[in-house]
Image (cartoon, rainbow, N blue to C red):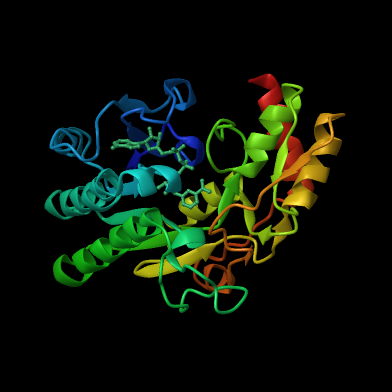
Amino acid sequence: MRILVTGGAGFIGSHIVDAYLAEGHEVAVVDNLATGRRASVNKGAKLHEVDIHSREVERVFAEFKPEVVNHHAAQASVKVSTGDPVFDLEINGGGTARIASLCVEHGVRKLIYASSGGTVYGEPAELPVPETHPTKPVSNYGLSKLVGELYIELMARTAGLDYTNLRYSNAYGPRQDPNGEAGVVAIFTGRMLAGEQCTIDGDGEQRKDYVYVGDIARANVLCLERGNGATLNIGTGQGTSVNEIYRALDAATGNTIAARNGPPRPGDVRNFWLDTTRAQEVLGWRPEVIFEDGIRTTVASFKED
Ligand SMILES: NC(=O)c1ccc[n+]([C@@H]2O[C@H](COP(=O)([O-])OP(=O)(O)OC[C@H]3O[C@@H](n4cnc5c(N)ncnc54)[C@H](O)[C@@H]3O)[C@@H](O)[C@H]2O)c1
């Protein structure tokens, strides 16, 4: 199958490219390298250095003639979305509108979209959070990711586009940026391996849902044949505290510097994890990588880098 992966030079997208190539598919990547790295793009896939928001992206559709488009390119920072809401909406809303409408124009069989389970729901009224939970984002980023979903659903209703929207919890694993604003596993791993002190926000007992990037990539492989017209949570269904993450990384890196506790993050939701029953039913997917193994693999790959 010919699959175009947007954001394929980024953390999650690059693992999806690897997984599709491993299954024998032909893969091309669209990425403007805003946060992605050329070195992360598998040599088996051609990189088109193009902005999803620009008209130029149409050329890639015309040339490569994708059968499936997997859309992971995004402005993925909550902080940037707060500082520059228009830019955030342009890339995540407008960019997704462009990708979805090009899928329709070029007869793409299916669009798979990376949405954000951690931000589209807002404050959880129940745990674990099911897909039927109201969507009331509390950040511009959460809203722009939701706009992407809604645009795709509109294209499905009005133009027959087939799709799966995947709402991820917090991803972690190799190639995550240790200098990013989020991604506590990558930030702590980077600091511990550099011999620097880690700062735990608040008391560290806040619990979130951390899913290994390889498990996410496998969900994206399953979506090639299943999950049409579905919006699915992808997570572990469990909360892990920041203190637990710190202790696991402490053991895996051999860190000797004690952490300090900083102030809690303003506006941070304290406890959050996703109900992933639907992904099990629809895709036959469940997370397979247990947390300690995922942490060990992540630390080993950060050491190699
Ligand atoms: N990391 C997470 O925990 C998480 C959770 C939920 C959803 N997501 C979503 O998954 C996707 C990938 O996230 P990630 O963590 O791998 O982030 P990332 O920043 O590593 O990847 C995003 C990629 O998109 C590219 N990109 C950004 N703007 C672009 C543009 N205008 N045109 C072309 N390419 C552009 C970047 O260069 C980068 O390679 C995003 O859509 C994000 O919203 C991530």
- x, y percentage for residue 256? 87, 29
Quarter placement of the C terminus: top right
Which residue is located at x 53 percent, y 75 percent?
130
Is residue 169 toward the left or the right of residue 24 in the image?
right
- The quarter of the image holding the N terminus is top left
Residue nearest the observer in this picture, 170 or 179: 179
Specify the quadrant of the image occupied by residue 149: bottom left
Locate residue 69, reporting x and y percent: 31, 47
Work out whether 244 lies above or below 12. Answer: below
Residues 232 and 273: in front is: 273
Say which quarter of the image contains residue 191.
top right
Q: Please state if 6 lies on the left or on the right of 66 as rendered.
A: right
Residue at point 63%, 59% (across, down): 209
User: Which sits in the foreground, 17 or 109?
Assistant: 17
Q: Which residue of the protein is positioned furthest toward the front in this rendering? A: 263
Ligand 1: quadrant of the figure: top left
Relative image position of residue 219 (x, y in whole percent): 52, 55
Residue found 61% across the figure and 34% down from its top: 174
Looking at the image, which residue is at 43% across and 77% down?
Answer: 134
Is residue 198 positioned above or below 117 on the image?
above
How many numbered markers are drawn? Answer: 0
| Spot occupied by residue 32 in the image (x, y as percentages of width and height) | 31, 29
